[in-house]
């Protein structure tokens, strides 16, 4: 498993932006698929976005398409989630996750970072 540490969460007003970062403990190169998930109070954890190693294709939840952008810098072992036009319903704890490219389930998780969007 890969150790993951998220940062960049905080409080922002509706329409604002935040950039989350996720630092991995080892070289992720192109062998790991990296993802972001979120969990709002009283709700189950849900998929937000993921980026493959090579090619760096991306997938997004419908609720964030056009507003969020996932990217990765394999040289820095870091994954980012740029969040624009934030809405109150984006309020949640955001988790970074990793899975080997041949695995179907994510098996490495960060501790989470809180994002709060005020109306």
Image (tube, rainbow, N blue to C red):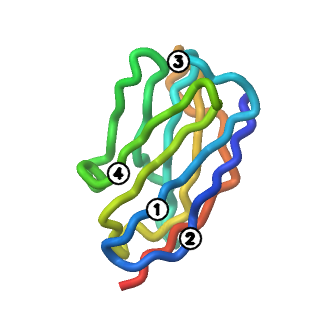
Precedes in sequence: disc 2 or disc 4: 2
What is the residue that sits farthest to the front in this orientation? Answer: 75
Mark 4 or 1: in front is 1
Residue linked to disc 2: 10
> Eyeballing the image, is 2 above or below 89?
above
> Eyeballing the image, is 105 above or below 66?
above
Residue linked to disc 4: 68
Precedes in sequence: disc 3 or disc 1: 1
Q: CA distance from mark 4 to mark 3?
A: 23 Å
Which numbered circle lies on residue 101? 3
Residue linked to disc 1: 18
Precedes in sequence: disc 4 or disc 1: 1
Contact between labelled residues 1 and 2, with CB atoms less than 8 Å apart: yes
Q: CA distance from mark 3 to mark 1?
A: 28 Å
Q: Nearer the viewer, residue 107 or 91?
A: 91
> Eyeballing the image, is 31 above or below 51?
above
User: Badge 1 local density, few (<14 within 10 Å), some, or many (20+)?
Assistant: some
User: Badge 2 local density, few (<14 within 10 Å), some, or many (20+)?
Assistant: some
**Residue 81: where, in percent of width, then height?**
46, 48
Q: CA distance from mark 3 to mark 2?
A: 31 Å
**Residue 26: where, in percent of width, then height?**
74, 26
Is 57 left, or right, of 28 in this rendering? left
Is 41 left, or right, of 25 in this rendering? left
Mark 4 or 3: in front is 4
User: Badge 4 local density, few (<14 within 10 Å), some, or many (20+)?
Assistant: many
Precedes in sequence: disc 4 or disc 3: 4
Precedes in sequence: disc 2 or disc 1: 2
Mark 3 or 2: in front is 2
Is 95 left, or right, of 15 in this rendering? right
Q: Quadrant of residue 7?
A: bottom right
Is 51 left, or right, of 87 in this rendering? right
């Amino acid at each position: 498993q890969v150790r993951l540490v998220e940062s960049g969460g905080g409080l922002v007003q509706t329409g604002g932006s935040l950039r989350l970062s996720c630092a991995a403990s080892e070289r992720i190169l192109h062998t790991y698929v990296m993802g972001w998930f979120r969990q709002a109070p009283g709700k189950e954890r849900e998929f937000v976005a993921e980026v493959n190693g090579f090619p760096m294709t991306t997938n997004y939840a419908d609720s964030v398409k056009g507003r969020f952008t996932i990217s990765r810098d394999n040289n820095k072992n870091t994954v980012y989630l740029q969040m624009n036009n934030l809405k109150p319903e984006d309020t949640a704890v955001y988790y970074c996750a990793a899975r080997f490219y041949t695995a179907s389930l994510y098996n490495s998780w960060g501790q989470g970072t809180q994002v709060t969007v005020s109306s």
